[in-house]
Amino acid sequence: MVFNIRAIQVKRMNYGDSLDYIKNLENNGDEIIVLPEKFITETVDEAGLYKIIDNLNIDNTVILGSLSYMDRYLYNRSFLINNKKIIGFQDKINLYNIEKNRYKNGDTVKIFNVNGIRIGILICYDLDFPLYPRILFNNKCDVIINPSLINRKFHDEWHLYVELRSLENRIPVISVNSISDDFRGDSIISIPYKYENGVKLKNYTEEYKDICVPVNDDYKEQRNIRLSEEIPVNKINFQEL
């Protein structure tokens, strides 16, 4: 199985401009199109979301980065759209810094099965915590999508997190950032591959351009080996001496 992923690095925009932008998205043979975290600067409600979906002119799988979404409470929420239908959503679990004063956090890690591809979405800061990628790994996730909004001062650390999560879980990780001035793109896709008796990473980065990458399932063998080798946490005892 091979699927193409396009990480779209865009400037943050207001809601009206986002409708025009979404309308002009093109199908370049990509099965999965990913936008950055909070790429729309305004709060979006259900009516606004469906207007965005109505403006899509493609039937690809589109991950709408994340939105400041009002659903009784305000969530930092990522929607997965396929054939212009909502497959599901993932809420950001670990809210970063002052987000805690505005948003309600999620409490569930999900896998979305689209055309045989098992997709996990971890929004920005959620990737920093090993537990959430591990839950996806243990449930045979095929790819982790990480819509992000990372200040340019922290790009080295951000890339390190992406690479570590990909390597330790043997899963491709696609992390997409905004190219607005404070963030400056620099998105990264990390894909594990077998190398002799071990595993290496292929990393793809661009400062301002989109990143278009074909992903095959060669990594699955290594993921399954790692799954079979790992001793479950509940089998490990703890002592404090």
Image (tube, grey):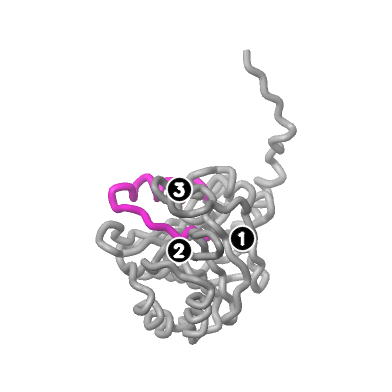
Give the extent of the magenta segment: 143-165
Residue depicted at x 60% and y 74%: 86
Residue depicted at x 37% and y 70%: 210
Q: Which residue is mark 1?
A: 142
Which comes sooner in the sequence, label 2 or label 3? 2
Residue 68, label in figure: 2
- Estimate how packed mark 3 is, as few (under 14), some (14 to 19) or many (20 or more) residues with alpha carbons within 10 Å: few
Instruction: Give me the C-alpha separation between circle 1 and circle 3.
Output: 30 Å
Q: Is residue 167 magenta?
A: no
Name the amino acid type tagged 3.
Answer: Lys
Name the amino acid type tagged 2.
Answer: Ser
Location of the C terminus (image quadrant): top right
Which comes sooner in the sequence, label 1 or label 3? 3
Instruction: Please tell me whether mark 2 sits on a helix, a strand or a loop.
Output: strand
User: Taking 155 as reference, is 106 left or right?
Assistant: right
Q: Which residue is mark 3?
A: 100
